[in-house]
Image (cartoon, helix red, strand yellow):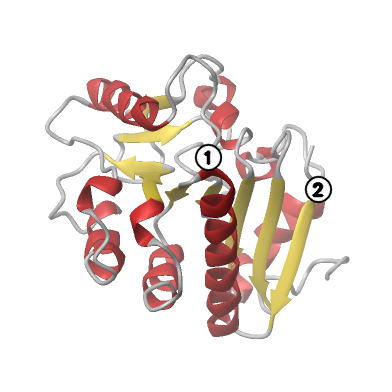
Amino acid sequence: MAAPIISVSETDKLVAEKLCSFVVEKANKAIEQRGIFTVGFSGGSLVKYLCGGLPGRSTDWSKWRVFFCDERHVQYDSADCTYTPYKEGLVDKVNMNPDNIFPIDPSLSVSECADDYANKIRKVFPGDGLPQFDMLLLGMGPDGHTCSLFPGHPLLEEKEKIVAPISDSPKPPPARVTMTLPVVNNCRCAVFASCGEGKADMVQRVLEGGESPPLPAARVRPIDGELHWFLDAGAASKLKHKM
């Protein structure tokens, strides 16, 4: 199981630059080895980092297949939608084929939406086995949640579904769809990016706390892949062991 590889930069701007360089390096290697790059995006600060830093970098965008680690069950024009800022800030800027980014269908019920999203994933990862994404870019909330997997929630124990609905998210909006932990931990590379002193306590708890039961973000440990944390000095300030 992957031990975290921690990279600390002085500022969030440097974190974003290092993160985007890392993503493109992994993308180009995946394209060279397997012909496509399969990636899952998350919302929050990652939108700013990726949309600000990825356009203009050298990669074959036609080989990217972009999914979402989780998404709020809202219309595309909602401020809570994760897909739209990536569509406008990345896909449109690099002239990526819009068919290569996979949003949820918010016209469906949240349960049907999750099933439909699992089917979209299966079109790129055919068969019954767990899909293996090249990279999942993850966020971490102030309660230690990642994707839409919240502390103490039954979805943390989901073993059968690759995408699950949630209707009682403790963080609004309550209805969402999310990749499950078996999918997350089957990826080739899981990546967190956290910046700011406000994240320092939770970063320390997730990476060094050894809590039982572990917080959702601490349960991200790829079985046969890498785990990377990109932090600024503020977010890393309470860690005992830094790289």
Which of the 4 image quarters holds residue 106? top left
- Give the residue number, with chain letter if any, for mark 1: 133
Relative image position of residue 197 (x, y in whole percent):
63, 75
Q: Amino acid at mark 2?
A: Ala
Residue 27 against residue 175 in the figure, above or below = below
Q: Is residue 59 visible?
A: yes
- Quick check: 53 left or right of 15? left
- Return the residue nearer the eye: 174 or 91: 91
93 vs 218: above or below: below
Q: Is residue 140 visible?
A: no
* Quadrant of the image occupied by residue 92: bottom left
Quadrant containing the N terminus in the rendered view: top right
Q: Residues within 10 Å of mark 2 (few under 14, many from 20)?
A: few
Which label sits on residue 3? 2
Mark 1 crowd level (few <14, some 14–19, many ≥20, 10 Å Cα): many
Disc 2 + disc 1, Cβ < 8 Å = no
Q: Residue at x 48, y 46 (%)?
A: 35
159 displayed left or right of 2: left
Mark 2 vs mark 1, foreground winner is 1
Q: Which amino acid type is shown beneath numbered disc 1?
A: Phe
Q: Secondary structure at mark 1?
A: loop
Q: Quadrant of the C terminus?
A: bottom right
